[in-house]
Structure formats: C-alpha cells, structure tokens
Amino acid sequence: ARRGRLAGGAGVDAPRRWRSCGLVGMPNVGKSTLFNALTRTQAAQAANYPFCTIDPNVAVVEIPDPRLAALARVAGSAKVVPTTLELRDIAGLVRGASEGSGMGNEFLGHIRSTSCVLQVVRCFEDADVVHVEETVDPLRDVAIIESELVLADLESVERRVGDKKAARLAARGDDAEAA
C-alpha cells in the first residue's frame, strides 16, 4: 500500500491500533479526489478511467477537536496529541466483484483491513467522466455496492462454518465425511 503524508507534512507509517476508514464505491465516483481533499495532499492519482487506483492509497490524518486545547490547559498537559484516523482510498468496486469481477477478491481484502467503510456515491452528471454502468443512478450504485459486500460476507461465513464443521468431523474420526 502506498503511504501518504500527514497534513503537517510528516511521513506516515501507521500502526494497526489506529482507526482506519476505507473509502469505498464504484470506479470514478470521487474516492481519490475525496482522499486528496481529506489528507490535504495529491497522493492519490485521480483519473478518468476505471481502476486508476490498484493499491490502496493510505494516509493518517489528525482529527481536529477544539476542546482538546481547553482540556490540555485545565489538565496542565505538556503535550497535546490529537486523535488520528487512517484513511484508505480503495479501488472501485463493480458488479460481480464477489465473484472475481474487476479487482474482485483483492478489493474485498482491502476492505476487510479497515475498521469502517465510508461509501462514496456519484450523484453528478458529467459526460466526460465515464461510469462503469453507463448511466448515473445513485440508488442502483448503492445497491450494487451493498450487495457485493453482503455476498462477500456470506462467502466468508460459509467458509468459516465449513471449516468448523470439517474440524468437528475430523475430531470425531469421521474423516470420510470431513473430506
């Protein structure tokens, strides 16, 4: 994954304990543009073709909180450390991703590495910006993204249930059934 920079310019090497948010949506909806705006960088390439983003763009941003300075004064803190959020600009999701279409399983793996998902949906008309479904329809696009995520979750659950069942059968000595 490509690493971004903090808004203040310091390099980033984000530990796992930070909260992470994956920007998810169909190709060409503005995920990379939003990532660049939130991180105050131009780290993510924003281009007018599907799958411009292959590897997630990653940056850690400080979350401004005006109450923090007041709390530091009251507590007599020598150092003020604002909370942070790791943002991940994830490649566009297309219909059939749960079955391997587009970036497919690789894309879904990038989503699983985040603490939360922020769905970015295209609600603007622009003939110069291609849409993988050929027309702009935000409700349809939300339904596609949600369906693909649910199907991927279902596949994960089925795999885990199958693994547990096979382990139980093997433990009982029913190796023929476990296979």
Image (tube, grey):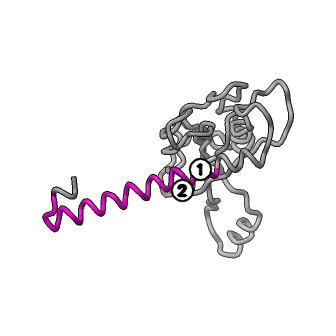
Other-residue count near label 2 (Cα within 10 Å), few / some / many at <14 / 14–19 / ≥20: some
Asked which quadrant contains residue 169, the reply is bottom left
Q: Amino acid at mark 2?
A: Trp
Q: Considering depth in this image, is 77 or 67 the residue closer to the camera?
A: 67
The residue sitting at the front extreme is 177
User: Magenta residues, as a range?
Assistant: 146-175
Question: At x 58% / y 41%, what residue is drawn?
Answer: 58
Q: Position of residue 79 (x, y in %)?
A: 61, 62
Q: Which residue is mark 1?
A: 86
Can residue 93 be spotted in the picture?
no
C-alpha span from label 1 to label 2: 7 Å
Question: At x 74% / y 70%, what residue is drawn?
Answer: 70
The residue sitting at the bottom extreme is 74
Tags 1 and 2 touching, CB below 8 Å: yes
Q: Which residue is mark 2?
A: 18
Whichever of labels 1 and 2 marks the residue nearer the N terminus, that label is 2
Q: Which mark is residue 117?
A: none
Is residue 156 rendered to the left or right of residue 167? Answer: right
Q: Considering depth in this image, is 62 or 44 the residue closer to the camera?
A: 44
Q: Main secondary structure of the magenta part?
A: helix
Q: Position of residue 25 (x, y in %)?
A: 67, 43
Q: Position of residue 2 (x, y in %)?
A: 54, 34
Question: At x 73% / y 25%, what residue is drawn?
Answer: 48
Q: Position of residue 178 (x, y in %)?
A: 22, 57
Q: Amino acid at mark 1?
A: Glu
Q: Considering depth in this image, is 17 or 110 the residue closer to the camera?
A: 110
Can residue 165 be spotted in the picture?
yes
The residue sitting at the left extreme is 173
Question: At x 79% / y 42%, what residue is drawn?
Answer: 137
Does residue 161 belong to the magenta stretch? Answer: yes
Q: Is residue 64 above or below residue 128?
A: below
